[in-house]
Amino acid sequence: MALILKKTPMREQAPDKRRHNFKEVALGYTLEEARTEAKRCLQCKKPLCVEGCPVNVQIPHFIKCIADGDIKEALRIIKETNNLPAICGRVCPQEEQCESKCILGRKGEPVAIGRLERFAADYMMEQEEDQQVPEMAKRDKKIAIVGSGPAGLTAAADLAKLGYDVTVFEAFHEPGGVLVYGIPEFRLPKSLVRKEIDGLKKLGVKFETNVIIGKTITIDELLDNGYEAVFIGTGAGLPKFMNIPGENLNGVYSANEYLTRINLMKAYDFPNSHTPIKQGKKVAVVGGGNVAMDAARSALRLGAEEVHIIYRRSEEEMPAREEEVHHAKEEGIIFDVLTNPVEILGQDGWVTGIKCIRMELGEPDESGRRRPIPIEGSEFVMDIDTVIIAIGTSPNPLIKSTTKDLAVYPWGGIIIDEETGATSKDRVYAGGDAVTGAATVILAMGAGKRAAKAIHEKLSRGE
Amino acid sequence: MYEIIEKRELAPGIKLMKVKAPLVAKKARPGQFIILRVMEEGERIPLTIADYDREEGWVSIIFQEVGFTTKALGMLEQGDSILDFAGPLGRASDLDGRQRVLCIGGGVGVAPLYPQVKYLHEQGTHVDVIIGARSKEYIILEDEMRKLSKNMYISTDDGSYGYKGFVTYVLKDLIKQGNKYDEVIAIGPLIMMKSVSQITKEHNIPTTVSLNPIMIDGTGMCGGCRVSVGGEIKYACVDGPEFDGHLVDFDEAMRRQQMYRNEEKRAEHECRLYKGAYE
């Protein structure tokens, strides 16, 4: 069989149409398309793709099942190691992970592993056959999971499958963490996250929303009240600002606030949904990561006439996924790279413009990327009415400040044992962005898995 | 769901609700707040805790019906439930070690002042209280405050009850008479807290104010509640809600409070639910 060098294309909403709606951009494969793509897989004896996956999904194995048309079995294989395939298939940076290792990628494009994973999950959800709950022996041991984002959900699922009595605590009114407040509908439909969470409920996982661990209940109280172990997966929710003049003007948002208003609170449907948001006409988003792309593309969908991404390095250094940058450009987002804001200008308290300076790249810095250096005298003013700051987030200090003996780094990340996720405090584990700072969904899931395994080993000792 | 076990109208458009929320009640302390959501599609709004009973497991809130959400909340009756009710949030007030404290409440701001006055009273602190409102009918918690305070003063803008004028007239008068206070605690409209802080600054009386800015999560995540205090950016939700009144940039805070003024107007005009409820 001749090698097919290109991925089977996936249908997308056309850019001029999708820039006006919040519906999902990528539309997924049909069964036929999925089987065609699955047949491209060489079924390597020593599959490198599996090594590239932070949770080691048995990739060739599930792809073979898709090629054979047994989607149910394909999903079962994925779910052995990945509890959230519909989500990972959409938001994992496959190009840096599994797909980057694919042998086909040396000559052409790698197998579209992410799209196939997504297909298997979506297809079975539609068939509504993804309901089978594996038989498991109940263990009479309670475990608390703090935070219901990717790390917490993964740890919860793994521990529930082992028979533990798992309760997930969430500060917001809806579980899902960054999957519901951060990642927009057009990249990850919320109905899908809800379905994945319903799946966990079927496994017996309990969800307690509106409970702020550290405030409503402390970690120590959980341990004193019958929970044998606690996993902290509270993410990196604290927005960073630039500390430049004008950041408190009306019309300046953190990306966190902007996206939370839109995604969790559905401000795009205001006033039917009661949370308002400023519908900027000319919007500047500062930053070059996925969150910046999400914010920019959301602003466009809210009706902005012009949306700028302002990034201080060049496009090559942008941390956002290539696909996101590509989609943003297709939709008409303007990229102002090698540009750095120095002041936000305002009148009567409202944003009217942003003063920027041009940058050039110098020697590589500690991150290995070339350091941006301001070009003297190159300041200029852009007229804009809304600014969204998307330059990163750090872990929330709320738990640290109310938990004795929990060691954290000076920048706020919880210190853990890499292998087990164990923190400095007995029976308390942590993982995901709360440990690493802002990273990816799949890395958080990997951390949740490792901690679940370690918790199980500790609690089952002597059984 | 969080059941409303008691509801009372304290003044026109100012309502008290006792809400069954045992976990919040167990931890609540004076100065802290909760965030609630009335219904699906509802906005999250912060409200300062007005009272609580750990044994009985309730927290009370007092709110003025000013926007869409507070009006929708006001329509719920005893036996109904509030969809989401999370807390306690923010730092508790630091009220220990004071001898003489003057507490000033304006309008619905008298409500969050109440647990503080109660706490101070229980500590044996000498507490004087000034409460102010537009007119007599808007004065709330008068009897409760009278029981807990050594001296109680009332002012109304129109002079229909107590002194005629703002609470600041009473404050100036008390200072002029030679009253000494370790601290002034002022809670009410931003403009009132600003005026109080200006006066107490002239007389070097440490002053604490409580801010209630726009916020979403209440845990430090959105940064929407940021306020300049002594030139530094603070988050009212986790660093506050109480701050040194002499350091708060009130003008900025007042401006930020207006962020969604236009949207609020639009909501009142457009929202189907609103129309359904008020037609």
Image (tube, rainbow, N blue to C red):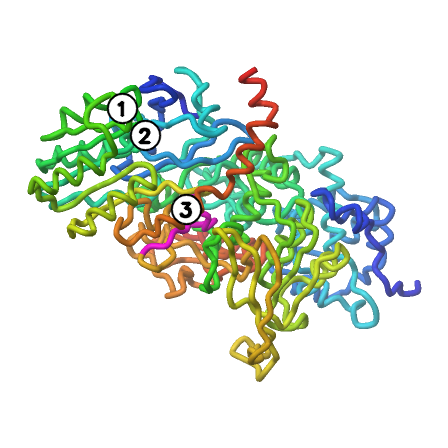
User: Residue B225 at what x, y percent from top left?
Assistant: 42, 47
The residue labelled by disc 2 is: B108
Give the magenta range.
Answer: B218-229
User: Residue A302 at what x, y percent from top left?
Assistant: 66, 45
Chain identifier of the residue bearing label 3 in the image: B
| Closer to the camera in the image, A7 or B146 | B146
In contact (CB < 8 Å): disc 2 and disc 3: no
The residue labelled by disc 3 is: B219
Chain identifier of the residue bearing label 2 in the image: B
Q: Is residue A77 visible?
A: no
Q: Secondary structure under badge 1? A: loop
Residue shown at the point (28%, 33%) measured from the top left:
B106
Left or right: A354 in relation to A219? right
Q: Quadrant of residue B190?
A: top left
Disc 2 with disc 1 on a shared chain? yes
Q: Disc 1 or 3, which lies upstream in sequence? A: 1
Q: Secondary structure under badge 2? A: helix
Q: Disc 2 or 1, which lies upstream in sequence? A: 2
- Numbered badge on residue B140: 1
Question: Of the residues shown, which amino acid type is indicated by label 2?
Answer: Val
Magenta span includes B269? no
Disc 1 with disc 3 on a shared chain? yes
Question: Of the residues shown, which amino acid type is indicated by label 3?
Answer: Thr
Q: Is residue B249 visible?
A: yes
